[in-house]
Image: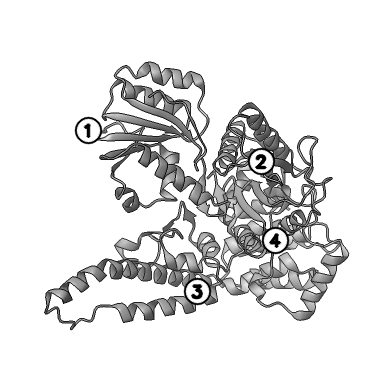
């Protein structure tokens, strides 16, 4: 179950099916992102695709010597663009691929528009999601719910994305959902409706143990997206922001022009692939090794290019050297900027207190530490508000709750009204009243013993004590102990055996910390394969935007082989 491979396979198949010759790839805004996550421009160029165009671009030239591969989402808007395109074709022949199920009436409209008979085929290739890591996918939707209920347009897009994912991985799953979330139940029903309606598409070879789709809601764990991160990929997203593998470094002091935006993709950056899940301290020493390696391979200034053989060797090694040079300068810049932000914002100290708030149960120590940091001028208003949010979530119903005092401290620190209001909004979004689970105090004897032993041994790394609630949920699921009264099955049948192929989807967004949990579970649990997805992949900033978009704050006062179907007309 590798989502990057699944999408890559679709795109390779499109290009292969169009045969030899020069091609143009015609995409929309969303499919451009979907393709760019799994292929670099230079990789596609090697497959004779010489031009990349947007279907909505008005001023495309007529180029009758090119074949057109069209990869589009099946929206009304895109179908209309395609009809206009076919009435006045700019290219010699068209291979049309929709990223999801397209209605028969839309196919008929395209056929009627194709008076010049330039369409070679129309097919459905289900690459309708963003493949972030092999085991992580996103739909890039921010603000999927209004209050506790779905925004109808986002429910429709999420259903399409999730069913496309199932088709691309060839899975027809049993479905479980979080009972405490109305949105999770609604999405489960919508996915089930599509599977029932398009039953022919979902007729895959039956496996002994059916796959399982588990639908969760972000409201159940509002702690994880509020924490600072210390592994490379998660930390880059938290402090710099990753948008479709791109990092904007334009605000970095003294940045050179060619590093204003960099791409971090495990598919074609070996250093990133090997380091994305390591913690910050390890990255530092690995960067040093990378630099030393680079110095050894650097062509000597005085290297004499006397013979043709010398010149040939230099020219052959140069592209490799150039690529390595780009990798070195990119990672040195990114790690340098992370380092600068950690020290400027006092994040080691801030993170230690965040971890205490998320993992320990000592109220008076936590309160004292939060108060101390709120007095520290190096702590930004963003980090100050985040600490108070974590406190508010953990000690919401504690007998000595001191939230009003902390809110006053935020005001005295000069923290803006926007951030102060977000404290109560986050509690409204993911507080005790909403959660279907107990985030903070383990109830069963095993969990209490584990916590006690952990306390005795001391923590290996004070900054990474926290484990997302998803870890416990998946652990119970894999062991066949996930309670059906909290996570019921949709429909009458249940799974008799322990699940093997698990797809987890988080409404309201997943995080890179949860992706790391899934990566580690995949690595350490033989026979189990897990893929994680979310409406988006959050850092703290985007999570707070999600909470704002839900509108809950307005109710609270200040005090979350390729599966394809052919519709072809050859």
Circles 1 and 2: CB distance less than 8 Å? Answer: no
Residue at point 16%, 73% (across, down): 311
The residue labelled by disc 3 is 283
Residue 186: x and y in percent read 70, 35
Please name whichever residue, 462 or 11, is drawn nearer the observer in this view of the structure. Answer: 11
Is tag 1's residue or tag 2's residue first in the polypeptide sequence?
1
Quarter containing the C terminus: top left
Side of 69 relative to 348 (left or right): left
Distance, label 2 to label 3, CA atoms, is: 43 Å
- Mark 2 or mark 3, whichever is nearer to me: 2
Q: Which mark is residue 206?
A: 2
Residue 2: x and y in percent read 54, 52
Is tag 1's residue or tag 4's residue first in the polypeptide sequence?
1
Circles 2 and 4: CB distance less than 8 Å? Answer: no
Distance, label 4 to label 3, CA atoms, is: 28 Å
Distance, label 1 to label 2, CA atoms, is: 47 Å
Residue 307: x and y in percent read 12, 77
Residue at point 42%, 28% (across, down): 122
The answer to whether residue 558 is visible is: no
The answer to whether residue 526 is visible is: yes
Question: How many numbered discs sit on the rendered protein?
Answer: 4
Residue 63 vs 417, above or below: the answer is: above
- Mark 4 or mark 3, whichever is nearer to me: 3
Which of the 4 image quarters holds residue 281?
Answer: bottom right
Is tag 3's residue or tag 1's residue first in the polypeptide sequence?
1
Circles 1 and 4: CB distance less than 8 Å? Answer: no
- Mark 1 or mark 4, whichever is nearer to me: 1
The residue labelled by disc 4 is 390
Which of the 4 image quarters holds residue 373?
Answer: bottom right
Which of the 4 image quarters holds residue 145?
Answer: top right
Element at label 3 = helix
């Amino acid at each position: 179950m590798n989502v990057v491979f699944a999408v890559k396979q679709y795109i390779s198949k499109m290009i292969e099916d169009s045969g030899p010759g020069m091609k143009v790839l015609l995409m929309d805004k969303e499919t451009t992102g979907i393709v760019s996550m799994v292929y670099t421009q230079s990789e596609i160029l090697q497959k004779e695709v010489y031009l990349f165009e947007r279907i909505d671009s008005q001023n495309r030239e007529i180029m009758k010597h090119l074949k057109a591969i069209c990869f589009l989402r099946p929206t009304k808007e895109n179908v209309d663009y395609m009809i206009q395109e076919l009435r006045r074709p700019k290219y010699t022949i068209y291979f049309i691929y929709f990223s999801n199920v397209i209605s028969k009436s839309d196919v008929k409209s395209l056929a009627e528009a194709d008076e010049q008979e330039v369409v070679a085929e129309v097919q459905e290739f289900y690459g309708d999601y963003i493949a972030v890591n092999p085991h992580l996918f996103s739909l890039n939707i921010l603000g999927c719910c209004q209050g506790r209920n779905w925004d109808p347009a986002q429910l429709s897009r999420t259903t399409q994305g999730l069913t496309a994912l199932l088709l691309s991985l060839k899975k027809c799953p049993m479905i479980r959902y979080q009972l405490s979330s109305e949105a999770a139940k609604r999405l489960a029903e919508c996915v089930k409706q599509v599977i029932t309606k398009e039953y022919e598409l979902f007729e895959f070879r039956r496996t002994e143990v059916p796959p399982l789709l588990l639908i969760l809601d972000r409201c159940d764990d509002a702690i994880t997206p509020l924490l600072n991160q210390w592994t490379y990929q998660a930390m880059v997203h938290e402090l710099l922001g990753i948008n479709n593998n791109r990092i904007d470094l334009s605000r970095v002091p003294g940045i050179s022009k060619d590093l204003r935006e960099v791409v971090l993709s495990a598919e074609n950056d070996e250093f990133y692939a090997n380091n994305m899940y390591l913690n910050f301290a390890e990255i530092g020493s690995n960067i040093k090794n990378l630099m030393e390696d680079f110095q050894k391979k650097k062509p000597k200034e005085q290297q004499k290019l006397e013979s043709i053989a010398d010149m040939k060797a230099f020219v052959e090694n140069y592209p490799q050297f150039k690529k390595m040079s780009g990798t070195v300068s990119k990672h040195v810049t990114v790690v340098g900027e992370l380092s600068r932000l950690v020290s400027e914002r006092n994040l080691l100290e801030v993170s230690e207190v965040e971890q205490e708030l998320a993992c320990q149960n000592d109220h008076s120590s936590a309160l004292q530490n939060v108060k101390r940091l709120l007095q520290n001028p190096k702590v930004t208003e963003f980090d100050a508000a985040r600490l108070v949010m974590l406190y508010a979530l953990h000690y919401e119903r504690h007998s000595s709750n001191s939230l009003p005092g902390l809110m006053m401290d935020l005001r005295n620190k000069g923290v803006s009204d926007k951030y102060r209001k977000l404290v109560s909004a986050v509690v409204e979004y993911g507080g005790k009243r909403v959660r279907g689970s107990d985030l903070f105090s383990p109830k069963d004897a095993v969990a209490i013993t584990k916590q006690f032993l952990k306390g005795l041994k001391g923590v290996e790394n004070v900054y990474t004590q926290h484990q997302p609630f998803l870890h416990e949920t998946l652990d119970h699921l894999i062991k066949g102990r996930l309670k059906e009264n909290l996570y019921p099955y949709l429909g009458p049948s249940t799974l008799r055996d322990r699940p093997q192929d698990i797809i987890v989807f988080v409404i309201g967004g997943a995080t890179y910390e949860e992706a790391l949990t899934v990566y580690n579970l995949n690595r350490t649990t033989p026979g189990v394969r897990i893929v994680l997805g979310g409406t988006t992949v959050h850092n703290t900033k985007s999570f707070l935007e999600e909470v704002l978009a839900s509108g809950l704050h307005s109710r609270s006062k200040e005090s979350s082989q390729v599966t394809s179907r052919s519709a072809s007309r050859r």
